Amino acid sequence: MKSMSHAALATAGLLGVILSVGSPVAHAEAAAGLALAQQQNCMSCHAVARPFMGPALHDVATKYAGRDDAATYLKNKILDGSAGVWGMVPMPANTQLTPDQAATLAGWVLSLK
């Protein structure tokens, strides 16, 4: 039997938590957000629960949860990149994403709080 990597186990565990609460629509949106984050290499620099090269996505969600414009703010940060907000490592612009994809990612990140 082939064993799963630590990252695969963490992703499977996260998906299990996401699917254990909320409506079927919320489940689909959460799964779509996670899949998009993995496809677009967000998880190369970010992890959900711990800092990596970038901040933990849970920490991002917590920091911006109180902003009325949080989804738009994060969508723009995802598209345009950012520097100096979370430390010395800048986040490059994600020019490969459409605005709708960035909005999906921003919504998913905010759901992690």
Image (tube, rainbow, N blue to C red):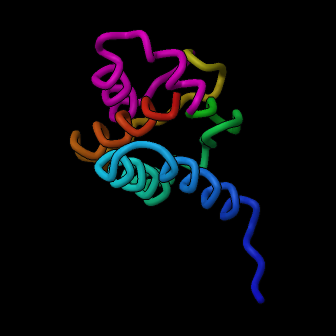
Residue 97 x/y as whole percent: 30, 47
Q: Residue at x 60, y 25 (%)?
A: 59
Residue 30 x/y as whole percent: 40, 48
Determine the residue located farthest toward the bottom in the rendered image.
1
Q: Residue at x 29, y 49 (%)?
A: 25
Residue 22 x/y as whole percent: 41, 43
Q: Residue at x 60, y 20 (%)?
A: 86
User: Which stretch is magenta?
Assistant: 58-84
Q: Quadrant of the N terminus?
A: bottom right
Which residue is more in the foreground, 29 or 7? 29
Looking at the rendered structure, the number of numbered marks drawn on it comes to 0
Residue 58 x/y as whole percent: 58, 30
Query: Viewed as shown, does residue 102 lie left or right of 11?
Result: left
Q: Is 96 in the magenta?
A: no
- Up the image or down, 74 lies above or below 64; here it is below
Which residue is more in the foreground, 29 or 44? 29
Query: Viewed as shown, does residue 28 lie left or right of 34?
Result: left
Q: Residue at x 33, y 52 (%)?
A: 24
Which quarter of the figure has residue 89? top right
Magenta span: predominant SS is helix
Query: Viewed as shown, does residue 41 lie left or right of 5?
Result: left
Which residue is more in the foreground, 61 or 81? 61
Q: Is 61 in the magenta?
A: yes
Which quarter of the figure has residue 80? top left
- Up the image or down, 113 lies above or below 25; here it is above
